[in-house]
């Protein structure tokens, strides 16, 4: 029997038995909010659907997604201001021209801006290496127009070509969020030999699969957040971990859902558990690079 195809990006290493370490201030659970600011093509390309469209162009689902940029994102920012939380803003670079001022507002409130490709109407997984490289370069050029140089990357639809991690490292990115394979940061092998850091980003505590795919609602999703934090804290005497909570303004930014998000985050913040480090994906990457180096 032939060997199973393997990605070659990392070796198997169980969570038990690893070297122990702590986050700044001897904290054990790093939590960040990954807020997806996305823009879509009208009548073309990919996009999440609230309900099946009966005709083309799909006005209903396009407008529902656009609600996130016009309303939901700003509701989020007001909420996170009240909670005194900076987020990792996962921004499609096409937001800069299609939703003027939105990316700048994230920047100006102190959010870390990570690149989320150009648009979530397209996925990069089937691109050639040259096409992939060109898309990454164009994404960076568009962010440069507002004086931002992202250091992290989340692929639209978590889609990668065979060479994406190599190309991201070569373009100067420090970390990638596509690989939901661990509760701790790991280093992905790249052709340069240096490796690019993989920061955990949840595909479970994520409102798209939870609400759109599984047809759950906000109270259940809020419960998932609380239960995940409780479980990871119960393991914190044995190991540090990372929880990236994935949010989309057109989903959890809806009024009836934002209320539940605020309630659960307020409870967690008011508990003031000294084991929790409320942070950003970039700050986690910086800490790992400074203290763990290539041993991540």
Image: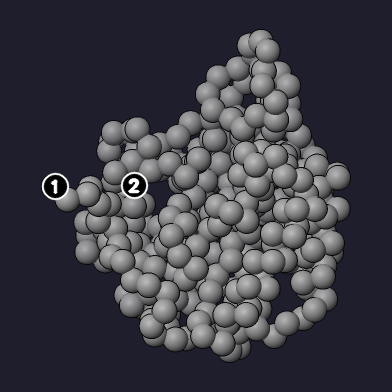
For the point 72% across and 53% down, the residue is 221
Q: Which numbered disc covers residue 253?
A: none
Residue 84's place in the image compared with 277, above or below, is above
Other residues around mark 1 within 10 Å, as few (<14) / some (14–19) / many (≥20): few
Residue 215's place in the image compared with 21, above or below, is above
Q: Which numbered disc covers residue 164?
A: 2
For the point 55% across and 70% down, the residue is 242
Is 138 on the left or on the right of 257, as rendered? left
Q: Position of residue 198 (x, y in %)?
A: 42, 62
Q: Is residue 37 visible?
A: no
Residue 91's place in the image compared with 152, above or below, is above
Residue designated by label 1:
2
Q: Quadrant of residue 84?
A: bottom right
Q: Quadrant of residue 174?
A: bottom left
Residue 28's place in the image compared with 79, above or below, is below
Element type at mark 1: loop
On-image quarter of the C terminus: bottom left
Q: Is residue 233 visible?
A: yes
User: Can you tell which of label 2 and label 1 is closer to the viewer?
Assistant: 1
């Amino acid at each position: 029997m032939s060997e199973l195809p393997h990605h070659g990006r990392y070796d198997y290493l169980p969570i038990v038995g690893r070297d122990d370490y702590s986050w700044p201030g001897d904290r054990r659970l790093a939590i960040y909010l990954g807020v997806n600011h996305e823009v879509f093509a009208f009548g073309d390309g990919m996009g999440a659907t609230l309900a099946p469209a009966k005709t083309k162009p799909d006005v209903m689902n396009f407008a529902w997604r656009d609600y996130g940029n016009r309303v939901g994102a700003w509701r989020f920012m007001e909420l996170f201001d009240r909670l005194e939380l900076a987020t990792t803003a996962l921004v499609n670079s096409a937001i800069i021209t299609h939703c003027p001022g939105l990316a700048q507002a994230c920047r100006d409130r102190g959010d870390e801006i990570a690149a989320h490709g150009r648009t979530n109407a397209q996925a990069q997984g089937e691109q050639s290496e040259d096409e992939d490289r060109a898309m990454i370069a164009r994404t960076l050029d568009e962010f440069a127009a507002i004086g931002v140089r992202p250091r992290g990357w989340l692929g639209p639809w978590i889609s990668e070509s065979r060479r994406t991690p190599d190309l991201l490292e070569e373009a100067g990115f420090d970390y990638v969020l596509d690989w939901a394979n661990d509760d701790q940061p790991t280093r992905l092998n790249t052709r340069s030999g240096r490796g690019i850091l993989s920061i955990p980003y949840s595909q479970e505590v994520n409102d798209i699969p939870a609400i759109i795919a599984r047809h759950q609602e906000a109270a259940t999703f809020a419960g998932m957040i609380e239960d995940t934090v409780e479980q990871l804290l119960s393991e914190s005497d044995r190991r540090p971990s990372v929880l990236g909570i994935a949010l989309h303004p057109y989903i959890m930014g809806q009024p009836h859902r934002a209320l539940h998000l605020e309630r659960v985050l307020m409870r967690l913040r008011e508990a003031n558990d000294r084991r929790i480090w409320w942070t950003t994906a970039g700050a986690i990457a910086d800490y790992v690079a400074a203290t763990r180096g290539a041993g991540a």
